[in-house]
Image (tube, rainbow, N blue to C red):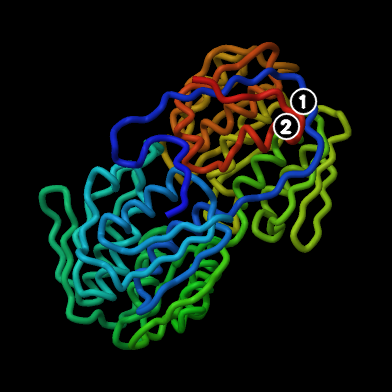
Amino acid sequence: MHFRFRHSRPGSGRIRVDKLAITGGARLEGEVRASGAKNATLPILAGALLADSSVTIGNVPHLNDVTTMIALLARMGVEVTVHDGMRVEVNPGSIQHYRAPYELVKTMRASILVLGPLLSRFGEAEVSLPGGCAIGARPVDLHVAGLRAMGADITIEDGFIRARADRLNGVHLVLDIVTVTGTENLMMAATLADGVTVIENAAREPEVVDLADFLNSMGAMVRGAGTNRIEIEGVSSLSGTDYDVMPDRIETGTFLVAAAMTGGRIRVKRTRPSAIEAVLAKLRDAGASVDTGDDWIELDMSCSRPRSVDISTAPYPGFPTDMQAQFTAMNSIADGVATITENVFENRFMHVHELQRMGAKIKIAGHTAVIQGIDRLTAVPVMATDLRASASLVLAGLVADGETLVDRIYHIDRGYECIEEKFQLLGATIKRVV
């Protein structure tokens, strides 16, 4: 297996304490390529368990969460080969057991995505209750309730979800809340179920559509992905396939916000503009000139300061919660006053305290932050608390006076591939230090 781990192997308990040192003031210019989408790669890797032969997945990003999912599959005995160019071959025929242990699942909530495929393909699964970022409650109740409705016998004990089923049955499911991983888990489980499954109030995110396209490339019959009603007609088996993951819309948005904050001009290549229309609209509101093509986005801030923009997060196609922290950072140095309301996760303003230490004028009332933009932030040592919070602190460092040191960046390595190298290509003064 040809794979370079940036940190220790997931589950080892030893994480190298890297930091990012950023000297602010550079105007970002140039081109950068979007990596494959983490939030599409993880369910697709889990979905490979459904196949009866090898699956090859391309455009896989080199991220800690991806290595964790690969390690999880390997722990179950699945043969996983990672080729140069980040193409991952998964052979589920070599699987030896159906258990996802706590030491891997605790580091990444997306590990719960193996539950549906294991149960549907092999008739049993034992998956630890998940961990992950501390940004709010993301219960697995809907996953369990949906699988039980499909005929699974499930118990939750000793921190594990234990599930059994001879063959799942198609049912009509109405989800209480919009849940991306819940939609994905139940959609994957339904591909091999007996009959037709309908998921109402389904998540509409592009990553859900990408997973559905992947499943259909294996012979599944999934219709309606991208709408709030998905219909899956179960089939007897799924075959191997060769599939490329979609570009990462959140990484794309992060680089565009960074360019807007620094008054820069950049082009993001190999991306998908249609996946982040809500973000592009807000960047235009902030004063940026934004042009798009089939697979590129160009933003030009013309050396000017962004205007403050109000944000209210919502499930897709609304403004993504995963871009909230980045826009909080931008509003901190924008012209005017902005309000940001977080409607998806109840504990996703943890980056605000660190931004305040850099001089940002932010007041929080419940789920809303009120931000008075200032001319410039001041560099201080800051600490990342979750994946997107860490990105916002990097962006703040790009416009701060002095050198900002961002600690605990193992969070950022979960979701951004080679972030310092990419920013260096755009002219930023940023480096990884120990």
Q: Residue at x 38, y 53 (%)?
A: 69
On screen, residue 76 above or below 342? below
Q: Residues within 10 Å of mark 2 (few under 14, many from 20)?
A: many
Tell me the number on the disc at residue 335: 1
**Left/right of residue 146 with respect to residue 370 in the rendered view:** left
- Residue 353 appears in the figure: no
Tell me the number on the disc at residue 269: none
Query: At label 1, which amino acid type do we have?
Result: Asp
In 3D space, how far apart are the residues under numbered discs 1 and 2 (Cα atoms)? Answer: 6 Å
- Residue 164 appears in the figure: yes
Q: Residue at x 29, y 40 (%)?
A: 11
Query: At label 2, which amino acid type do we have?
Result: Ser
Secondary structure under the numbered disc 1 in the rendered image: loop
Q: Residues within 10 Å of mark 1 (few under 14, many from 20)?
A: some
**Left/right of residue 239 with respect to residue 119 in the rendered view:** right
In the image, residue 151 lies at what x, y percent?
Answer: 20, 77
In the image, residue 314 lies at what x, y percent?
Answer: 54, 51
In this view, the residue in front, 348 or 58, is: 58
Q: Residue at x 65, y 24 (%)?
A: 430
**Left/right of residue 131 with respect to residue 24 in the rendered view:** left
On screen, residue 96 above or below 248? below
Tell me the number on the disc at residue 308: 2
On screen, residue 49 above or below 395? below
Quadrant where the image shows the N terminus: bottom left
* Mark 1–mark 2 CB contact (< 8 Å): yes
- Quadrant of the image occupied by residue 192: bottom left
**Left/right of residue 299 with respect to residue 146 in the rendered view:** right
